[in-house]
Image: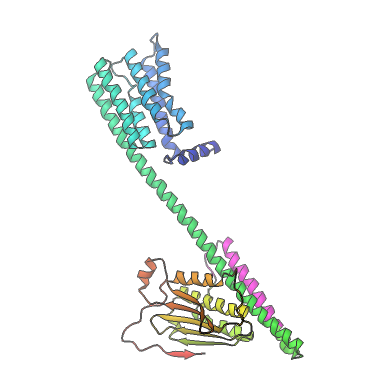
Amino acid sequence: MPAHVQRMKRRWVANGLPDYPMWIAAVIDSAALTTAVVAVGQRFGREDVWVAVGLVAVALAPWPLELWWQGRTWPVFAVVTSGAVATLMVLQPLDYDFAPLFLVLMVGHVTACVGAWRGLVVLAAGETVVIGLVLNGSLPGWAAAIWALSMVVALDIGYVMRSQQLRIDGQREEHEARERQAVLEERQRIAREVHDVVAHSLSVTMLHLTAARRDLEDGGDVAEAVESLREAERVGRQAVSDVRRTVGLLGSADPVAPPAPTVADIDGLVAEFRAAGMAVTLTTTGQLDEVPPATGLGLYRIVQESLTNVARHSPGASAAVLLDLASDPGRLVIRNPMPLPLAARTGGSGVTGMAQRAVLLGAALHAGPRDGDWVVEVELPRGDTARDSAGGHVCPLPRLVRGLPRPSVGAT
């Protein structure tokens, strides 16, 4: 589509008019031009044919004028087109005149573009012309009835066209809004993934580097310091690989994503922090295989972010992780002693990211001080998967089945 045509359509829509396909406008304009040619052709050979040419040009003028005025030309249709048709038929009457088709096209066009109320005004102008021509004797009664009924039908067709096109425009706008929202949510999801991977990896790396520095400063075992440095290097390389993989998904056409962490991987995550020197305990209650994959990923990321925050804000502090899958609601609790004095936590997005993950799971997250500790607690209500999915959330845990024995309890 040419650029000037696109600009014209944008101005048309900006003025509140329906965004009709160009072929519809071409059909209406071609019909008006054809009417003009036929009306002049019917009078060809007369000495005053140039009068007919001038009046037909005046009747046709509102159509090209609409390219600039866009929706504000309906009074011009009512006055100019109706007046020109009436004048032509009075000055040069014919038994089977084609000129009244201008009135029919006028009513349908105005109604389709600017609505039924303005269409009714233009219809009244056209019906007035027809009645006046009958009273003047320039139009037979049978022909007047046909043209009057045709204008009413044109009003109805124009109204239906406008209603359908406005509905299509509304659906397209809603679809575009949903696409923008989906893109925004995907960007937020990727941002959370990159944040979690980078923050976790840097925290573990810093723990290893700190342990190596202390070993060297205190005259400790050089072999242990070297091992800590090697572990820091491994975690750093893994972080780079994870970030590249996550960012690479943005430009990849491959719909198969790499496997995401699950709730079963929390044990390995805790072991990784232990290896970096943090005193972390993990207690699990219930069966891990009950947790849906999406919920497992959310729980893994929340534990990862919580332990990363402990390493960042409370170096040397211990932490306790409790995952209770046997209760209703289930619970995930991460607790660590709060540092004294308290460090100001500004500019971070960790708690916000955890809260967003909890909302997406249909769970509730509470983070804050409690009895001298910093506590992150997630409540995992059980429910009907189909019902929760209809609301846009993943069911955190399946329903407890009555009559079955209580799931086993394990601790690490």
Q: Which residues are magenta?
A: 229-257
Snapshot quadrant of residue 129: top left
Name the residue rendered at 62%, 69% in the picture: 243
Picture coordinates of residue 286 (x, y %)?
A: 43, 86
Q: Quadrant of residue 311?
A: bottom right
Where residue 280 appears, x then y in whole percent? 57, 86
Above or below — where is 44 with respect to 150?
above
Q: Quadrant of residue 102?
A: top left
The front one of 392 and 230 is: 392
Instruction: Tell me if residue 182 comes above or below residue 31 in the rendering.
Output: below
Q: Is residue 245 magenta?
A: yes
Whether residue 92 appears in this view of the structure is: no
Residue at position x 43%, y 78% from top? 379
| Residue 327: x %, y % from top left | 39, 84
Q: Is the magenta region chiefly helix, strand or loop?
A: helix
Farthest residue in the top direction? Answer: 47
Inspect the magenta stretch and tell me whether residue 242 lies in it: yes
Query: Does residue 219 sit above or below 138 in this rendering?
Result: below
